[in-house]
Image (cartoon, helix red, strand yellow):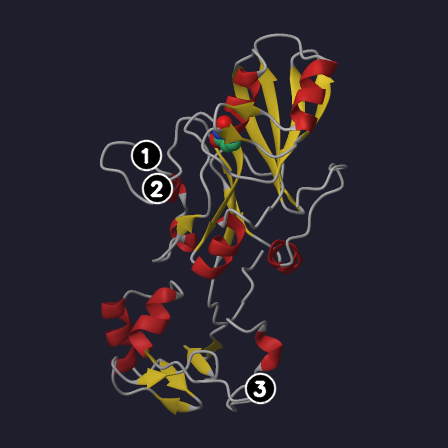
């Protein structure tokens, strides 16, 4: 599956190649930077490819690595192949246990360490955190704007988790979650819970407070012993992804995230 392209004001369809429409501003970048950002080649390899005449822009050979182009408006070819420029990358990872949701760490393995070379690109970061022992859907992107929209306290993007606890769950627990758990000064918004097995429940929350699911269960007198995120907004974890694997989101999944769609588990609304 190929990653899809998203630009600041919308998808590619606003752009006619080689023209500027509706007052779009060109953003010029060095050709070596453009190609290395797309994992075509390292900046030094691009220099060599330019020397060999392998890179063309709008039908003309590029002469120097510091020549600048707007990658969204320029027909760039590499060895005769059109470059499909992707401004941002959106990856769904099935986060495994024991790995940090961080960009880098001097001691522990992070989710970015797990990316295969063809999906590594500068600027990627996990949009939101899962605890080290939590598994499941983690979004990794280089789109700070989308991440900000999703993570802002008032954004209320729904996230669905499966939690297994250390005791049998009850209808009182469901009701407590529905009312909204309070721990001292800390108030959680109402959350929907569905018991799916004696000790296991699906829980949907629309906030992203630190250790939120574990704290909510702790407040009703049980500890979470396994936690998996199954969905963010309207986008489900792809169960074909083995732990540690990832894939680019499809275009419709990206649109669902941008539109803050949600799944149909929820009954109560979080405003
Ligand atoms: N809530 C938690 O307690 N932990 C997570 O990793 C995510 C939500």
Q: Could you tell me residue 40's position as x and y percent?
A: 38, 66
Q: Could you tell me residue 162's position as x and y percent?
A: 62, 26
Horizontal arrangement in the rendering, residue 33 relative to residue 97 (left or right): left
In the rendered view, would you say 94 is above or below 165?
Answer: below
Q: Could you tell me residue 86's position as x and y percent?
A: 48, 67
Disc sitting over residue 109 in the figure: 1
SS class, disc 3: loop
**Residue behind mark 2:** 113
Horizontal arrangement in the rendering, residue 101 relative to residue 13 (left or right): left
Q: Dots 2 and 1: beta carbons under 8 Å?
A: yes
Disc sitting over residue 199 in the figure: none
SS class, disc 1: loop
Q: Residues within 10 Å of mark 3 (few under 14, many from 20)?
A: few
- Of 124 and 172, the residue lying toward us: 172
Please identify the residue farthest to the top as the structure is shown.
Answer: 167
- Of 145 and 111, the residue lying toward us: 145
Upstream in sequence: badge 1 or badge 3: 3
Quarter-wise, where is residue 108 in the image? top left
- Of 223 and 135, the residue lying toward us: 223
Task: Using the numbered discs, state the Cα–Cα distance from disc 1 to disc 3 in whole angstroms.
Answer: 43 Å
Q: Residues within 10 Å of mark 2 (few under 14, many from 20)?
A: some
Which residue: 53% across, 16% down?
A: 218
Task: Using the numbered discs, state the Cα–Cα distance from disc 3 to disc 2 in whole angstroms.
Answer: 37 Å
Which residue: 63% across, 46% down?
A: 233
In the rendered view, would you say 210 is above or below 122?
Answer: above
In the rendered view, would you say 136 is above or below 47?
Answer: above
Disc sitting over residue 16 in the figure: 3
């Amino acid at each position: 599956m190929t990653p899809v392209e998203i630009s600041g004001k919308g998808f590619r369809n606003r752009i006619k190649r080689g023209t500027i429409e509706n007052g779009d501003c060109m953003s010029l970048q060095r050709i070596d930077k453009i190609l290395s950002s797309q994992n075509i080649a390292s900046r030094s390899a691009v220099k060599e490819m330019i020397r060999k005449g392998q890179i063309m822009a709008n039908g003309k050979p590029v002469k120097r690595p510091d020549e600048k182009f707007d990658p969204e408006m320029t027909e760039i070819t590499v060895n005769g192949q059109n470059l499909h420029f992707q401004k941002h990358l959106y990856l769904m990872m099935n986060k495994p246990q024991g790995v940090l949701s961080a960009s880098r760490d001097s001691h522990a393995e992070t989710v970015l360490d797990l990316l295969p070379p063809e999906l590594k690109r500068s600027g990627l970061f996990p949009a939101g955190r899962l605890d080290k022992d939590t598994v499941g859907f983690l979004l990794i992107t280089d789109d700070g704007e989308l991440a900000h929209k999703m993570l802002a306290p008032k954004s209320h993007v729904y996230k669905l988790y499966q939690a297994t606890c250390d005791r049998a769950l009850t209808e009182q627990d469901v009701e407590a979650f529905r009312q909204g758990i309070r721990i001292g000064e800390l108030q959680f918004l109402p959350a929907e819970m569905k018991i799916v097995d004696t000790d296991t429940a699906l829980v949907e929350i629309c906030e992203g407070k630190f250790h939120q699911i574990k704290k909510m269960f702790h407040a009703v007198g049980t500890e979470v012993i396994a936690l998996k995120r199954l969905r963010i907004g309207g986008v489900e974890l792809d169960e074909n992804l083995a732990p540690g694997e990832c894939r680019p989101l499809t275009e419709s999944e990206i649109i669902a995230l941008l539109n803050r769609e949600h799944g149909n588990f929820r009954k109560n609304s979080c405003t």
